[in-house]
């Protein structure tokens, strides 16, 4: 057993939410350690391609954004959290820009796209590698700060102490104890493990296995909607090298539509995620789908309708991936089918990200309530930044007061 120096704040997880919390806590004057299961670069956030939502359009507002979130959640989200999410969105974007994120711009403003379930164009992008750009900027900010990074230190146990919490981490078989005044859980969801158990495909990083959520539940933390797992409507179905790849939903924002085997549109391609995913499953079940060469179900995503100029600016990575596999999405439709993607529910939090256990905070995919039982695209990265900042600030204030 090895003990480390005590910290004010311990953050578990190095995705966008954990990094946002850690950077914010450091800037609030806290001594911070960030512990990860694998490398500090390994996370789901970096794989997020579609973008991040914020109300910047002249015809838009945080209130309209909130209504879209509420409606897409089928009125199951926590409205307090939703209003904070959308109200804090513009300032979160400006904060990311201060850290070096360069969002795609046009005509003197942000290049905005309309995503599924949205009533306005409000999706900001960095090409089609928005998550990578955000996590890199946050990671650079943390690595240049006094904060400590504990890579390859998965969390094994949490115990209360008189002054906060004691975490037991594992490092190459050796237990490491870390004391902290407050702990922020930002370890993501469990969809990689769930997909493996179901024999399905997943968009998730292999580290998304849910042990930290289970650990918090065993401590007595309350949770909500843990059964509500989301399928990404547009998983790659063929070729084999693209299976499990999350085709950016911005393909549909820029004109792609879903077609059945007869070439017929069968749903609103810009409906909410769960609606589109269910429509695809139903169409295949009705016998109007396509079978991939390896026997998997699929429908067509007609990407040939996307203007080349839009694809070059907003979908370059997707084009490279498919063209490298021998398919040009601008010349022929691609095959798609829903894949397991996101844990909508999670630990119950308040407006500062605190769980029902004092001094234990949660942000990002591990937390529930912000999306209810169905998440809109573009709101996961936003949630990470908005509630990561809130949790990091609150945890620092608690620990150093």
Image (cartoon, helix red, strand yellow):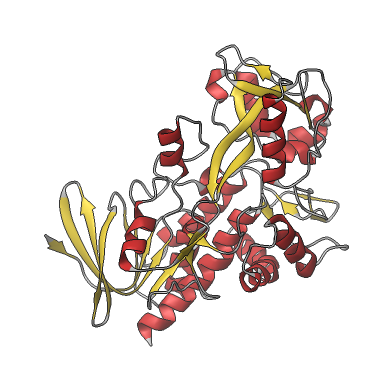
The answer, for residue 62, to whether it is visible in the render is: yes
Q: Is residue 121 left or right of residue 125?
A: right
Which quarter of the figure is the N terminus placed in? bottom left
Q: Is residue 376 above or below residue 158?
A: above
Residue that sits furthest to the front in the current view:
286
Above or below, 297 against 177 in this view is above
Report the front residue among 74 and 336: 74
Coordinates of residue 123 in the picture (x, y in percent): 73, 52
Q: Residue at x 56, y 62 (%)?
A: 385
Which image quadrant: the C terminus? bottom left
Q: Quadrant of residue 304?
A: top right
Give the residue at the far bottom of this rendering: 401
- Seen as rendered, the residue at the extreme left is 1
- Where residue 221 sits: x, y (%)? 39, 68
Q: Can residue 148 be seen by looking at this rendering?
A: no
Q: Is residue 325 left or right of residue 68?
A: left
- Left or right of 215 on screen, residue 23: right
> Based on the displayed image, in which of its 4 quarters is residue 314 positioned?
top right
Instruction: Indicate the position of residue 217 as horizontal and vertical percent values.
Output: 36, 62
Question: Which residue is the extreme one toward the top?
Answer: 293
Which residue does the image show at 72% across and 28% down from the upper left? 283
- Residue 241 position within the rendered picture, expressed as x and y whole percent measured from the top left: 53, 21
In the shown orientation, is residue 266 left or right of residue 199?
right
Which residue appears at 55% of the width and 51% of the height? 228
């Amino acid at each position: 057993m090895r003990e480390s120096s005590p910290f004010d704040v311990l953050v578990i997880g190095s995705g966008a939410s954990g990094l946002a919390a850690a950077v914010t806590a450091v800037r609030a004057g806290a001594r911070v350690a960030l512990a990860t299961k694998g490398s500090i670069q390994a996370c789901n956030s970096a794989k997020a391609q579609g973008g991040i939502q914020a109300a910047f359009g002249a015809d838009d507002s945080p209130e309209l954004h909130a209504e879209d979130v509420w409606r897409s959640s089928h009125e199951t989200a926590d409205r307090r959290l939703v209003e904070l999410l959308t109200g804090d969105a513009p300032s979160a974007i400006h904060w990311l820009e201060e850290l070096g994120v360069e969002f795609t711009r046009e005509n003197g403003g942000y290049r905005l796209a309309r995503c599924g379930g949205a009533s306005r164009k409000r999706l900001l992008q960095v090409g089609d590698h928005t998550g990578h750009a955000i996590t890199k900027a946050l990671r650079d900010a943390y690595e240049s700060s006094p904060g400590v990074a504990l890579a390859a230190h998965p969390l094994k146990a949490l115990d209360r102490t008189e002054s906060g919490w004691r975490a037991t981490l594992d490092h190459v078989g050796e237990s490491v104890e870390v004391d902290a005044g407050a702990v922020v859980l930002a370890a993501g969801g469990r969809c990689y493990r769930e997909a493996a158990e179901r024999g399905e495909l997943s968009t998730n990083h292999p580290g998304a296995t849910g042990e930290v959520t289970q650990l918090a539940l065993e401590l007595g933390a309350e949770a909500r909607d843990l059964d509500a797992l989301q399928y990404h409507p547009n998983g790659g179905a063929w070729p084999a090298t693209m299976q499990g790849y999350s085709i950016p939903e911005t393909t549909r924002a820029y004109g792609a539509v879903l077609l059945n085997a007869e070439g017929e549109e069968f749903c609103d391609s810009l409906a909410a995620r769960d609606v589109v995913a269910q429509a695809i499953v139903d169409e295949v079940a009705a016998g109007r789908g396509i079978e991939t060469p390896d026997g998997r179900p699929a429908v067509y995503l007609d990407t040939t309708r996307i203007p080349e100029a839009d694809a070059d600016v907003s979908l370059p990575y997707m084009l490279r991936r498919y063209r490298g596999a021998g398919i040009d999405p601008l010349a022929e439709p691609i095959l798609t089918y829903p894949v397991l993607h996101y844990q909508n529910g999670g630990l119950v939090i308040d407006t500062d990200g605190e769980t029902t256990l004092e001094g234990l905070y949660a942000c990002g995919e591990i937390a529930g309530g912000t999306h209810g039982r169905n998440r809109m695209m573009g709101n996961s990265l936003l949630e990470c930044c908005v509630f990561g900042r809130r949790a990091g600030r609150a945890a620092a204030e608690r620990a150093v007061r």
